[in-house]
């Protein structure tokens, strides 16, 4: 038997953390469930997809300790429809092999699976551990995650490469079309960490949790596993087994033609012009002294052109880009101005926030 009572908002928040970890289509039925364990200290809710695991502790009134697994999405849908601030009772019926859910006059019963078969990720020894502020971790993720490759065949690019170098903790992501690199001061305990590739799905889940965090995040890692612990939540993940490419070779060093422009104004110009290049994705940047002209022209979609003032002082030059990739980078420029370094009309460019020396972006040109 198991019988507990928990506050609706706390239960809903914990279940919300499991929703994107638990896949809706499962070949292993128990992976569609969350494991609820009740002890004298409260309850824990755990979900896993065998690569990623989340565990959260909740205060609760425990009448009878025990454990059960319940369909994750159905339980979440029930709890989110209950009145705010209500108390939710969960009890296991051994006679019917169901979990009874009650709140006020509302009553539900869900089929459950015995907890003995619920998989638990083996906890590896993690020789490296350090604390990172929620703000710093969020910055590393935000400034790089958009560039993670979505191509499953390039599995070693399907995550963020986290490593340390020259007294900094560095995060890198690339999909072959653009590269994003962000760094922060190396926290105590992170010196000598192995370079690890954190999977895209894990990064997405950590990003959601960090937005709610009010304290530092404790990170522990080995060559094969990483754990993020914040307040009452712990997220464990396997790492991508692969070698990350030498990204520093991709960062150009001879881009001596530079311009600075208002990042938001440039983004608005690109968005306007991109209306006529939704299929081709291509836009052309035409550089002239103190002026940047952005244009797009396709035979079946039409023509668009706009311009803005810049600090450019070099020779006239044309270069083409995928407008979506350019907008993704400009979205990470939080200061007023973006600095763009060019070499010529066919070579990668470097983009930087003039107010943030800790981030750098590389964008490959395209033929337009």
Image (spheres, rainbow, N blue to C red):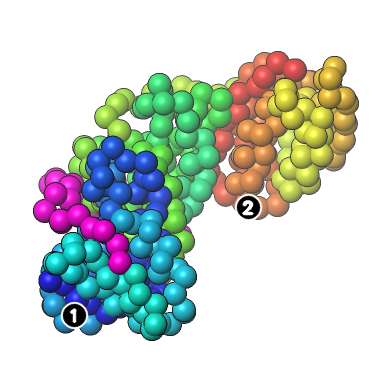
The image position of residue 335, as x and y in percent, is: 65, 53
| Quadrant position of residue 247 | top left
The image position of residue 121, as x and y in percent, is: 18, 47
Q: Which is more foreground, mark 1 or mark 2?
A: 1
Q: Quadrant of the N terminus?
A: bottom left
Q: Quadrant of the C terminus?
A: top right
Disc 1 to disc 2, C-alpha distance? 48 Å
N-term mark: 1 or 2? 1
| Quadrant position of residue 330 | top right
**Position of 292 relative to 62 (above/below):** above
- Observer-nearest residue: 75 or 35? 75
Residue 190 appears in view: no
Would you say 282 lies left or right of 179 here? right
The residue that label 2 is drawn on is 334
Give me the residue at 23% from left, 48% from top.
30
Numbered mark located on residue 198 in the image = none
Total labels: the figure holds 2
Q: Which residues are magenta?
A: 109-136
The residue that label 1 is drawn on is 62
Give me the residue at 36% from left, 79% from top.
103
**Position of 172 relative to 155 (above/below):** below
Dot 2 crowding, Cα within 10 Å, few <14, some 14–19, many 20+: some
């Amino acid at each position: 038997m198991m019988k507990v009572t928990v506050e609706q908002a706390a239960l809903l928040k914990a279940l919300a953390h499991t929703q994107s970890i638990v896949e809706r289509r499962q070949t292993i039925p128990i992976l569609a469930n969350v494991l609820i364990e009740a002890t004298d200290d409260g309850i824990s809710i755990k979900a896993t997809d065998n690569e990623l695991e989340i565990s959260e502790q909740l205060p609760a009134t425990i009448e009878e300790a025990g454990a059960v697994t319940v369909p994750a999405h159905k339980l979440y849908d029930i709890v989110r429809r209950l009145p705010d601030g209500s108390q939710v009772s969960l009890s296991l019926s051994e006679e019917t092999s169901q979990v009874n859910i009650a709140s006020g006059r509302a009553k539900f019963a869900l089929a459950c699976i015995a907890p003995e078969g619920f998989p638990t990720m083996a906890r590896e020894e993690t020789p490296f551990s350090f604390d990172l502020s929620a703000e710093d971790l969020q910055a590393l993720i935000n400034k790089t995650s958009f560039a993670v490759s979505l191509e499953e065949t390039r599995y070693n690019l399907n995550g963020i490469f986290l490593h340390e170098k020259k007294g900094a903790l560095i995060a890198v992501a690339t999909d072959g079309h653009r590269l994003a690199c962000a760094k922060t001061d190396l926290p105590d305990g992170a010196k000598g960490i192995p370079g690890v590739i954190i999977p895209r799905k894990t990064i997405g889940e950590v990003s959601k949790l960090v937005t709610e965090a009010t304290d530092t995040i404790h990170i522990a890692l080995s060559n094969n596993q990483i754990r993020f612990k914040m307040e009452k939540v712990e997220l464990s993940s396997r790492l991508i087994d692969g070698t990350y490419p030498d990204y520093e070779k991709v960062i150009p060093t001879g881009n001596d033609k530079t311009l600075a422009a208002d990042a938001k104004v440039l983004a608005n110009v690109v968005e306007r012009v991109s209306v006529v290049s939704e299929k081709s994705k291509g836009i052309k940047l035409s550089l002239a002294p103190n002026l940047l002209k952005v244009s797009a022209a396709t035979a079946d979609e039409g023509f668009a052109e706009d311009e803005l003032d810049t600090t450019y002082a070099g020779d006239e030059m044309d270069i083409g880009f995928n407008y979506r990739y350019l907008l993704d980078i400009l979205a990470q420029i939080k200061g007023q101005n973006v600095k763009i370094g060019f070499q010529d009309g066919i070579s990668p460019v470097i983009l930087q926030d003039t107010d943030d020396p800790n981030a750098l972006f590389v964008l490959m040109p395209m033929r337009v």
